Amino acid sequence: MKVLVFDTAAEASAKAFDYFGEALGKGASVFGLATGSTPEKLYEMMTQSDIDFTQATSINLDEYYGLSGSHPQSYRYFMEQHLFNEKPFKHNYLPNGLNENVDEETARYDQIIAENPIDLQLLGIGVNGHIGFNEPGSDFEGKTALVDLTTSTIEANKRFFESVEDVPTKAYSMGIKSIMSAKQILLLAFGESKAEIIKAMVEGPITTDVPASILQNHDNVVVIVDKAAASLLS
């Protein structure tokens, strides 16, 4: 695991942008993408650049259960607004939050991942250590699943909704085993609120209590953080 520390989130995002460009230059064609506030600056840099994804495939980590792709708080809508509308891909894949047949939807998404091995996977990290929506206690061998969101995750996401009651309590999420199957992983984290979990992920034991700690076992992980998020690393 390589840890790169930058003065600001903008500088860190620029480094992440460089990794995407390098991956494309080396023939990468499948990119695992994340949502949330952390990658917004990276996506902004992409939309303002000449980077070309028209022959590439994107596979997103997750989608809220019960929200349509046109819902303003869905992750499909987020991706369209922040990236896809300006930088189209050949194929975009996200879970279908409206599919109530859970076995069908999880099997469909696992098949997509199997048929499109991910070259570069982008991750954020929750304050409780989740990657995707793989909350503490998630099986390291898990694949796509419908998961119950923890109270801390719901609280962290309520700023995007009118009230906490509007936040979905479940989501479809790529599993940890699928994330670990990516050839290269970039994890971004910014701000003092992420300092404790970054320390636990990088320097603590590998435990399902900190799902992201499993990344210690991947042979090509780059953790890109600002000084605030890195402040507790020894």
Image: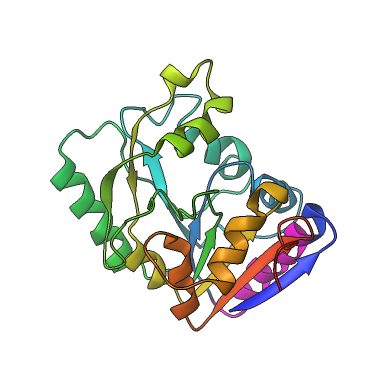
| Relative side of 160 to 115, left or right | right
**Considering depth in this image, is 208 or 143 the residue closer to the camera?**
208
Q: Point out the residue furthest to the right here.
A: 7
- Residue 223: where, in percent of width, then height? 63, 68
Q: Residue at x 26, y 62 (%)?
A: 142
Residue 231 among those drawn in magenta: no
Q: Main secondary structure of the magenta part?
A: helix
Front-lying residue, 59 or 224 = 224
Left or right, 138 with reference to 105: right
Q: Is residue 36 rendered to the left or right of residue 224?
A: left
Could you say which is closer to the camera, residue 86 or residue 117?
Answer: 117
Q: Give the image location of residue 35, x and y in percent.
A: 54, 45
- Tell me which segment is drawn in magenta: 12-27
The location of residue 126, given as percent across then percent down, is 53, 49
- Vertical side of 120 occupied by 80: above or below: above
Residue 222, x across and y down, in percent: 61, 73
Residue at image location 67% in from the left, 69% down from the top: 21
Quarter residue 201 falls in? bottom right
Q: Quadrant of the C terminus?
A: bottom right
Within the image, what quadrant is residue 117 found in? Answer: bottom left
Q: Quadrant of the N terminus?
A: bottom right
